Amino acid sequence: MKIIIGFMLLIIVSFSSRSYDTVDPTETTTSSRIETFTFSSNGTAIKGKIFLPASYETNKNLPAIYLIDFTEQHFKLATDEFEMVIDGVQQIQGFDALVVTLEEHLDIDAKPKVFQEYYDTFKNMTSYVDGKYTNNTSRTFIGRGSEAGLVLMTLFLENPKTSVFDNFIATDSPGTFNSTIVDMIEKDDFPKNKLNKKLHFSFSTSNDYDQCTKMINTINEAQYPWLQFESIEYTNSNYENTYPISFAAGIKYSFNK
C-alpha cells in the first residue's frame, strides 16, 4: 500500500510541476506579417496582399505605400520588388508603413494608352485598405520600369478633386512613358490645381540617358509650386541592381527621413 501511495504522490507532484511551465495566455509577442485580401475594381474581384509591421498591433495610423509590380518583360529575374519596398521601409529607424500590392504578378508590358485601367485598380485598392487597415491618409505610389511610367502618369493625370496619392517614386521608366510625360508638360495638357505632391525619380545605366535627362530638365524648368522633385542618376549601376537602393532612397525622400 505504501508503494502505491508513494507512486500516486509522485504523479501528482509531476503534474503540479508541469503546470508552472505553461505560457500565460496574456503574454503574447507581436511580429510583422503579410495578409491577403480581396477587393472589387470595376466589378471584378481582385486579390491583394499587405505587409503589416509589428507596430501595427498598437498603431493603426500608419501610411501606406502601394507598389505596382507586374512581371517585368525584359528582366524576368527581378521578382522581389515587394520585399525591396519592405526593406526600404525597415532601413529607416523609428519609421513604419504598410506595403501593399497585387497578390499576383500580372504578365503585362504596360503602355501609356492603358494607364486609366491600371490606375483605377490601385485607386479602388486604396479605398479598401483605408476602410480596413489604416486611419492614415498618406499614400505613396512606387514602381520601376513600365510600372514607373504608370506612377509618373498618375502624378500628372490624377483628378485633383479625387486624387489618392501624395508621393510618387519612379525608377527607370521607359522611353515610351518619358516622352509622353515630356509632351504632356510641354503642351500643358493635364489637370491643374494640384496640391502638395512629391516625386522621386531615378534612372540607371540601362536607361536612355538623353531621354531621362530631358524629362528631368522639363520637370525642373516647369517649376510647379505644387511639386517637390528629386532626381538621381545611378552612373555605376544597371537596371537589375538599382531598384533596391532607389526604392529606399525614394521612401526616405517621400517621408523626410
Image (cartoon, rainbow, N blue to C red):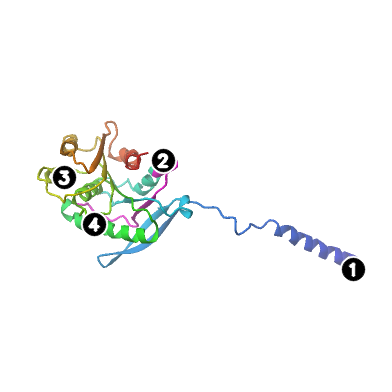
Q: Inspect the image, locate mark 4, and give the three-letter code of the amino acid beneath it.
A: Thr
| Mark carried by residue 246 | none
Q: Is residue 67 left or right of residue 59?
A: left
Residue 131 placement, left or right of 16: left
Q: Which residues are magenta?
A: 89-110
Location of residue 33 in the rendering, given as x and y in whole percent from the top left corner:
45, 54
Verify CB contact (< 8 Å) between mark 4 and mark 3: no
Q: Residue placed at 27% from the left, 57% from the top?
A: 123
Q: Give residue 215's position: percent from left, percent from top.
A: 17, 39
Residue found farthest to the right: 2
Which image quarter: residue 231? Answer: top left
> On the image, which quarter does residue 240 sit in?
top left
Verify CB contact (< 8 Å) between mark 2 and mark 4. no
Distance from label 2 to label 1 (Cα)? 70 Å
Quadrant location of the C terminus in the rendered image: top left
**Depth check: 169 or 74 in front?**
169
The prevailing secondary structure element of the residues shown in magenta is: loop
Mark sitting earlier along the chain (4/3):
4
Lower sequence index among marks 2 and 4: 2
Nearest to the eye among marks 2 and 1: give it: 2
Q: Earlier in the sequence, mark 3 or mark 2?
A: 2
The residue beneath circle 1 is 1
Q: Residue at x 39, y 44 (%)?
A: 89
- CA–CA distance between discs 4 and 3? 21 Å
Disc 2 secondary structure class = loop
For label 4, the SS is: loop
Task: Indicate which disc, 2 or 1, sits on the residue closer to the N terminus.
Answer: 1
**In the image, which disc is placed on residue 181?**
3
